[in-house]
Amino acid sequence: MRIVICGLSITSSWGNGHATTYRGLVSALEERGHWVLFLERDVPWYEQNRDLPRPARGRAELYSSLGELQDRFGRIIKAADLVIVGSYVPEGVELGKWVINTAGGITAFYDIDTPITLAKLERGDYEYISPQLIPKYDLYLSFTGGPTLDLIERRFGSPAARVLYCSADPAIYYPEKTKPHWDLGYLGTYSADRQPALDCLMLEPARRWTAGRFVVAGPMYPEQIEWPANVQRIEHLPPTEHRSFYTQQRFTLNITRADMIAAGYSPSVRLFEAAACGTPIISDHWPGLESLFEPGKEILIASSPEQTLHYLHDFSRTQMQIIGERARQRVIAEHTPEHRALQLESYVCEARLKGDFAQRRNAALYIG
């Protein structure tokens, strides 16, 4: 297929989890013989923090305005077999309208922020998708699975809402024989609704166990946060350093945003990355977690400082290695970019077999 993706970013992972997801998916699609063009809005905050200006697989192009995208890439989008518009893309609604009325192939909205998107729609915030636009896309690819998929079809009229989780490439994320530098680490951009869990599951354990070594990596944390003396801060960690970061931890912490806990079935890309590295994960709990990793065997669940400290103090090295390796095998079996590419291919085939996408597009009036 000829595939065009209009996404938030593939060149910069600064402050977002989209880039690593797109990089893995594009690479896997190209590996399977597809031609992929990624179109990214050129914005100052990514321009100053591009850790992959030229992806190794696929073609990436920057554009400065919607008009420029239309002028430069209109013919390619019209001829493409599949055009994907991602969440949080600037002027996403206007871009989506134009894509739906221009593309000759399957159109899809890829929501890497589904619970946040649905909460925005409930508030009447149509930053990058609107209720009127959802039924016009042939596919709604969702970062969230479970009951949310039925909700998107039932309440918003999507012809086909399908889960497309993020993933981790085992060729990039794998165990390394290194001496642990930290007892517990966390990688994630600051979010106000995640901070209470970070305080409960890491910062309070750090206060109680002053001999322990902890680390938090990620941008945008407010200056007024009082970090315990034994918590190291790293402002930004590019994906090229993620594997080394995870493998230098005895345990790593996974924390989920409030909207994603409420929706359930919303795994972070960091969850898969850490698991692929064989680092045992301590996580908060959310509905659907059991469908991805088996608690107690492939992942550890904590809801209090005491539970975190129990894992840090009482688990032997052998127990840690077993849990980490089980999680790694689960990723290899179910959550690689190749798995996502295969899923995407099946969804496109399904949309084509319905046989009505072309007729619906030809009959549709301009979306105003």
Image (cartoon, rainbow, N blue to C red):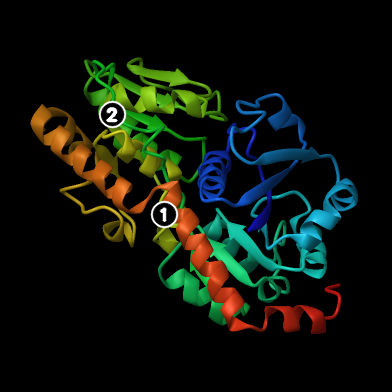
Q: Position of residue 310 (x, y in %)?
A: 14, 35
Residue drawn 36% across and 38% down? 170
In the depicted structure, whether residue 193 falls above or below residue 173: below
Identify the secondary structure beneath mark 1.
helix
Of the residues tagged 2 and 1, which is closer to the observer?
A: 1
The residue under label 1 is: 339
Quarter of the image where the C terminus is located:
bottom right
Total number of numbered discs in the rendering:
2
Q: Please indicate whether residue 97 sits to the left or right of residue 212 in the image.
A: right
**Residue type at numbered disc 1:** His
In this orientation, does residue 160 appear?
no
Q: Is residue 360 left or right of residue 306?
A: right
Distance (Cα) linking label 2 and label 1: 21 Å
Q: Quadrant of the N terminus?
A: bottom right
Residue extending furthest toward the front: 33
Q: Is residue 257 left or right of residue 285?
A: right
Decide if residue 31 is in sight here: yes
Q: Secondary structure at mark 2?
A: loop
Above or below for 286 versus 39:
below
- Report the amino acid beneath label 2: Pro
Residue at which label 2 appears: 175
Report x, y in % for residue 112: 55, 53
Q: Are marks 2 and 1 in contact (CB under 8 Å)?
A: no
User: Mark 1, residues whose alpha carbon is within 10 Å: few (<14), some, or many (≥20)?
Assistant: many
